[in-house]
Image (spheres, grey):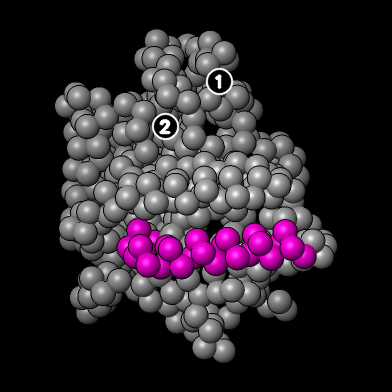
Amino acid sequence: MRYLAQTSATPLGLQIEDASGCWLTDHKGRRFLDLIAGIAVNSIGHRHPAVFKAVQAQLDRYWHANVYGEFVLASQVSLAEKLCQIVAQAQTRATNKESPPLQFYPTNSGTEANEGALKLARKYTGRKKFVAFHNSYHGDTFGSLSVTGRDVYRKPFEPLLADVVFLNYGDLSGLDQVDEETAAVIAEPIQGEAGIIVPPDGFFATVRKACDRSGAVLILDEIQTGFGRTGKWFAFEHWGVAPDIVTVGKALGGGFPISGFLAPLSIMETLSRDPPLCHVTTFGGHPVASAAAAAALEVLKSFQLPERAAQIGCLLKQRLHLLKRTFPDLIADVRGLGAMWGIEFSRHEICDAFVRLALKHHLIVCRTLHGRPVIRLSPPLIISEGELDWALSVMEGILREIRESPASTSRKQTQAPLSN
Ligand code: PMP
């Protein structure tokens, strides 16, 4: 608390000693089942041996070598090749059309990927305006914050980018705002921090049409939803649309920091000229993180983890709806896709008590960032049925405890631990 800058007054403060698979162990040797996976990062579990091996092999060769794509770094190239193929295949599955050849621009964090995507859209179209959605979350640097749809986080840092219009997510009525001035529409294919909001079928097809009609670029932020989380490699596959630019991060690195954006060559090439080096990064695509990511993609593929996420989704859907029916006084809604679910409680106090009691019972869950009393479930995709079953029984016990002793919700917490 003294030396490390704090982002809230009430950090959870769990002292992590080690992590493996779906479990975290604290300094007292207590084990916790991780139902958030570092917010959809550790999709292949903690310290996967295949990632460990790839990282070790890269550490034995070289670490940082040079910047801005000046050198050929094998782990970067191999990652880019795999990723472009995976995204192109997903786009083809989504649209039944051949995807144009893609390129990958590697960055370090989710927000940085979105910054690059927004700049690319402006440079490619020569237009300024962005259309984004209320309650979205795209990151905390100035560009990404400018298209993040929550006033409470925006206000302290204004002025942000001008020329941003916010529409209601899932609502077709405002889409005439996507016009000839619009550089890009940016959206999450399922809103994460808003409280796991799944848009209605047909919404993204109409957004896609609005972009095609006006010449705006469609940026889909798959930073939280990507790499199998929702039961498909990318969530846009649920909606039958392909974005022009897709941003990725979180699970990409198998636990190492790496992110980026992908676009057709015809769009991406605008970043290499007029002037050259107009968008560069020192550490983007670090060789060690790239090696980790390439190995993580192989794990996702060979263990068919997107398919596994869909199975997790069937189980969660059934059990969470049962919880909602059993505790209608405590649970207002449950919603999600694949291994990305939200439980909305009827009051904030219940939500905070649930997070606290879960920890007491060795389960790690957390709130979504925006205002609603929602906890997120985004477990590692390798979680077993036994582990899930145990977690859901513990959750049922916690809800009973809350119902039977209303005092458990009385300790007021203005900010829940482990958000974002
Ligand atoms: N976009 C989405 C959809 C996210 O969920 C997040 C992080 N929660 C980000 C962007 C920002 O990623 P990072 O924290 O790595 O900058």
Q: Which of the two residues, 230 or 2, is positioned nearer the viewer here?
A: 230
The image quadrant that residue 274 belongs to is top left
Residue type, numbered disc 1: Asp
Overall secondary structure of the magenta stretch?
helix
Q: Position of residue 22 (x, y in %)?
A: 40, 70
Left or right relative to 354: residue 183: left
The image quadrant that residue 288 belongs to is bottom left
Residue drawn 57% across and 13% down?
173
Residue drawn 74% across and 51% down?
348
Confirm if mark 2 falls within 8 A of ligand 1.
no
Q: Position of residue 240 (x, y in %)?
A: 32, 26
Which quadrant does the C terminus fall into? bottom right
Eyeballing the image, is 365 above or below 196? below
Disc 2 crowd rating (10 Å Cα; few below 14, some 14-19, many 20+) is many
Left or right relative to 292: residue 85: left
Eyeballing the image, is 278 above or below 301? above
Residue drawn 50% across and 55% down?
377
Q: Which residue is mark 1?
A: 171
Secondary structure under tag 1 reads loop
The CA span between labels 1 and 2 is 18 Å
Q: Which residue is mark 2?
A: 219
Magenta segment, which residues? 380-405
Q: Position of residue 125 (x, y in %)?
A: 41, 21
Left or right relative to 176: residue 249: left
Residue drawn 35% across and 62% down?
385
Which quadrant does the N terminus fall into? bottom right
Q: Position of residue 376 (x, y in %)?
A: 55, 53
| 223 falls in the magenta region | no
